[in-house]
Amino acid sequence: MFEIVVAVIIAFLIVLLAMPTTIRTLKEKGKVGIDVHKSAKPEVPKGGGYIVLFAIVTSLLVIIGYITFIRAEAVDPALLAALVSILMAGMIGLLDDNLDFRTRTKIALPLLASIPMAVMAVGTTTISIPFLGTIEFGALYPLIIVPLIMTFIIDSTNMYGGMNGLEAGLAAVNSSAVVSYVILLPLFTGKAIMQSQLDSGTVAAALLGAVLAFLIYNKYPAKILPGDVGRLPIGAAIAVALILGNMDRLAIIIFAPFAVNFLLYIIYRIHVKKTGMDYVKFASPREDGTLEVVGPFTMYWVLPHFFKNMTEKKNVLLLVIFQALLAYGTVFLLLIAYPWGVGLF
């Protein structure tokens, strides 16, 4: 558990202390974006994800150093693979921020970040699927399933965002759910925590510390925006944590809203093509701060579509609360179910 606590603290402090200077520097360099959900359309520094990525990686490197030099043990190669995947996701996000790839390219590129996890065959080759049972995938798991899982989680994390505090808030909920599961699992099983579970909790803890500190600056009204350089490694970090810990059931349930968001986007694009209407990427703010949307075509448009008094701040808060109820409720139910052989593993 020491590694989990240290990872949270280091990542949190790095972001907390470095972000004011980062905000000032990005402003001076003209690296800003338009906060589109405000009627005044203010310019906000963009690219704060640099520090989130740096915090995650640094905290994990400290843990790896602790294992190597203090505990004098060999580092699990799976943890190293996870670290490289997160770094690769950050590099892809950096390229996207600067080159603005086409949508198809954006969706496909995160597949590259799964390569370290695939070649190191990280994870267990069996998956427990609700209502279907346990399926053995063998070599198909690292070669097919892991890349698909990572690509989906990275892409869906990138897509389910765009409002102040939304990406960081959802990431804080999901990562804290993983950390909670890892910490509480021994209490329900009576067994010592496995190395794969500890590695999973450590990665999730690094992400949790980073996004909690980032939320201080990114919550409404945002003082800084993450950019793809932040959103993609956030997705990669939670993906590798779930794979490291073999938490397939938890992954399926907590990312269900992300899957729905993706499906709504596909429906929207089909609707635009069939009707010939203009494609609108963002909600439009009214003078009173409420949001106007063209339809319920993303998770974060559903509430503004049905409730005309929905502001950006309220919308994000309700979405994060919903994710928290889903994630923590799932963790609780799976922990309770574990003694009957229907837990995550």
Image (cartoon, rainbow, N blue to C red):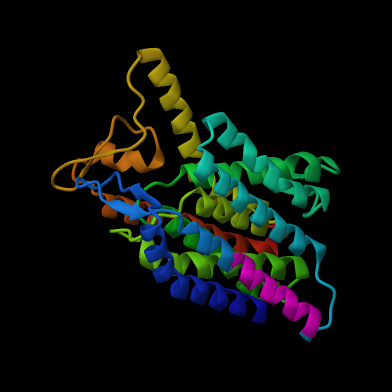
Image: 149 above or below 326? above
Q: Residue furthest front?
A: 29
Q: Residue furthest bottom?
A: 70
Name the residue rendered at 71%, 57% in the picture.
84
Image: 44 above or below 276? below
Image quadrant in which you'd find residue 152: top right
Q: Quadrant of the C terminus?
A: bottom right
Image: 48 above or below 291? below
Of 218 and 318, the residue lying toward us: 218
Q: Main secondary structure of the magenta part?
A: helix
Name the residue rendered at 75%, 46% in the picture.
115
Image quadrant in which you'd find residue 265: top left
Q: What is the number of callouts on the image?
A: 0
Question: What span is in magenta?
Answer: 56-69
Which percent across, then down, holds residue 248? 67, 51
Image: 187 above or below 51? below
Q: Quadrant of the N terminus?
A: bottom right
Which percent across, then down, holds residue 327? 51, 57
Residue 89 appears left or right of 12: right
Name the residue rendered at 56%, 77% in the picture.
10
Residue 177 at least partly seen: no
Name the residue rendered at 48%, 62% in the picture.
172
Which percent across, then down, holds residue 15? 48, 70
Which percent across, then down, holds residue 26? 41, 59
Of 272 and 253, the residue lying toward us: 272
Of 26 and 164, the residue lying toward us: 26
60 is within the stretch colored magenta: yes
178 is within the stretch colored magenta: no
Residue 33 appears left or right of 205: left
